[in-house]
Amino acid sequence: MTPSTAAAREQARASVALRWVNYVLLIPLMALATAVFGCVSLLTSLWDRSGRQQHAIARAWASVMLSISLSPVRLVGFDRLPEPRAAVYAANHLSYMDTPVLFATLPFQFRILAKRGLWRVPFIGWHLHRSGQVPVDQTSARSAIVSLNGGVAALRAGLPLLIFPEGGRSATGDTQSFLSGAAFMAIKAQVPLVPVTVVGTYELLPIHTYHLRPRPLLVVLGEPIATLGLTTREADALTRQAYEVITRTYLAYSGREAS
């Protein structure tokens, strides 16, 4: 047996062992944590109408999820956060793990815009509803506009918003084209659009897989893009600018080549 063959067999055995650790230990622990924190979140919603305590619980859940996944996360660019924090934070979307990563690292209370279908998922949907997150209904153009105006109202009330402008997880790990909803809301509310680049979650948990590959993760905050004086007719140009910043940052930090 050649050294390369022996190494390949050893790597295959390690991969099988990691899969079993995932199925027997890590994934059940993550499901249990989600159920437990979801129940606690629902309980606090009985008296906490502001969503602040629920956001704190979501951050605790996120930290536990990252600990279980054996994947530490580091925030780059903290000094770029705008003051006040009310802004649209637009992030690339690589994995189901993006949400706990962002809850664990962004050091302020925010609300998320997510597909309305998530509101039907037990515990997750209940938390989203009771904590005041913003559902996006994409069944028609009119429904989408109504959903985005709900986000604008939250921004005008001083609440930062987090959105995945790709509209879904990347199937390849590359940045997909952005929808213009994030730019539309930022312009209507006249708040900055902040590009947020998530690195490493695609390798940690790619789409359509159910086992983790632990690794260090990064969240990189870009320079806030001002929207003062812009009109919604310029939403497409602002969307392209955010896409270019996130794509360039992702390629720089991930080591991937442009496709």
Image (cartoon, helix red, strand yellow):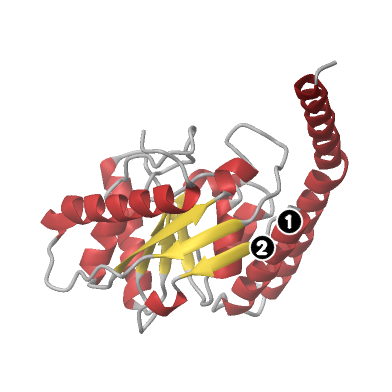
Image quarter where the C terminus lies is top left
| Residue 115, placed above or below residue 87 | above
Write the residue at 63% across / 57% down: 126
Disc number placed over residue 62 in the picture, else none: 2
Of badges 2 and 1, the one in the foreground is 2
Query: 240 or 218: which is nearer to us?
Result: 218
Query: 39 or 194: which is nearer to us?
Result: 194
Inter-mark Cα distance, 2 to 1: 9 Å
Write the residue at 59% across / 56% down: 217
Residue 108, percent across and down? 51, 77
Q: SS at mark 2?
A: helix
Residue 34, percent across and down? 73, 56
- The residue positioned farthest toward the front in the image shown: 2
| Residue 63, placed above or below residue 178 | below
- Tell me if label 2 and label 1 are in contact, CB under 8 Å: no
Disc number placed over residue 92 in the picture, else none: none
Q: Residues within 10 Å of mark 2 (few under 14, many from 20)?
A: many
Q: Residues within 10 Å of mark 1 (few under 14, many from 20)?
A: many
Please identify the quarter of the rendering in which residue 22 is found.
top right
Question: Identity of the amino acid at label 1?
Answer: Thr
The residue that disc 1 covers is 34
Answer yes or no: is residue 32 visible: yes
Query: 158 or 213: which is nearer to us?
Result: 213
- The residue positioned farthest toward the bottom in the image shown: 83
Question: Identity of the amino acid at label 2?
Answer: Ala
Please identify the quarter of the rendering in which residue 39 is found.
bottom right
Q: SS at mark 1?
A: helix
